[in-house]
């Protein structure tokens, strides 16, 4: 098992900032995961909203038939 202060290196990060630690990498991964989960949640809510709206229209049309 590695310590959080174990050294790491990320070649595609900007020059001078490529050296890092396992702890920093773990925090970045958690942040990235949370950000993408947030994006997925927004998309899910948009899809659910569209489905809810379509479902509501169908129910309203059925109810209007019996007025």
Image (cartoon, rainbow, N blue to C red):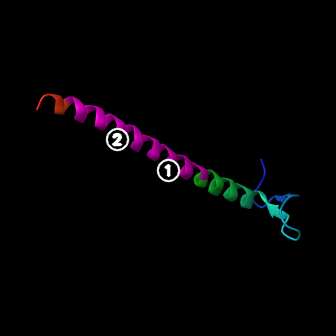
Say which residue appears at 65% left-offset and 54% top-offset.
Answer: 32
Query: Is 66 rendered above or below residue 27?
Result: above
Q: Which of the numbered marks, if any, corresponds to residue 55?
A: none
Query: Residue at left 50%, top 50%?
Result: 42
Specify which label sits upstream in the sequence, 1 or 2. Answer: 1
Give the image location of residue 51, x and y in percent: 40, 37
- Decide whether residue 60 is among the magenta residues: yes
Position of 51 compared to 30: left or right? left
Tell me where residue 23 sits by quadrant: bottom right
The front one of 37 and 23 is 37
Query: Which residues fall within the magenta stretch?
Result: 36-62
Q: Nearer the viewer, residue 15 or 6?
A: 15
- Local secondary structure at mark 2: helix
Q: Label 1: which residue?
A: 42
Residues under numbered marks 1 and 2 in contact, where contact means CB atoms less than 8 Å apart: no
Q: Quadrant of residue 10?
A: bottom right
Helix, strand or loop under label 1:
helix
Q: Is 41 on the left-hand or right-hand side of 35?
A: left
On-image quarter of the C terminus: top left
Q: CA distance from mark 1 to mark 2?
A: 16 Å
Residue displayed at 34% across by 41% down? 53
| Residue that numbered label 2 is attached to | 53
């Amino acid at each position: 098992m590695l310590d959080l202060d174990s050294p790491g290196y990320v070649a595609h990060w900007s020059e001078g900032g490529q050296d890092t630690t396992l702890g920093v990498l773990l925090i970045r991964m958690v942040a990235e995961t949370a950000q993408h989960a947030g994006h997925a949640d927004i998309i899910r809510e948009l899809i659910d909203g569209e489905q809810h709206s379509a479902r509501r229209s169908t129910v309203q049309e059925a109810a209007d038939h019996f007025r």
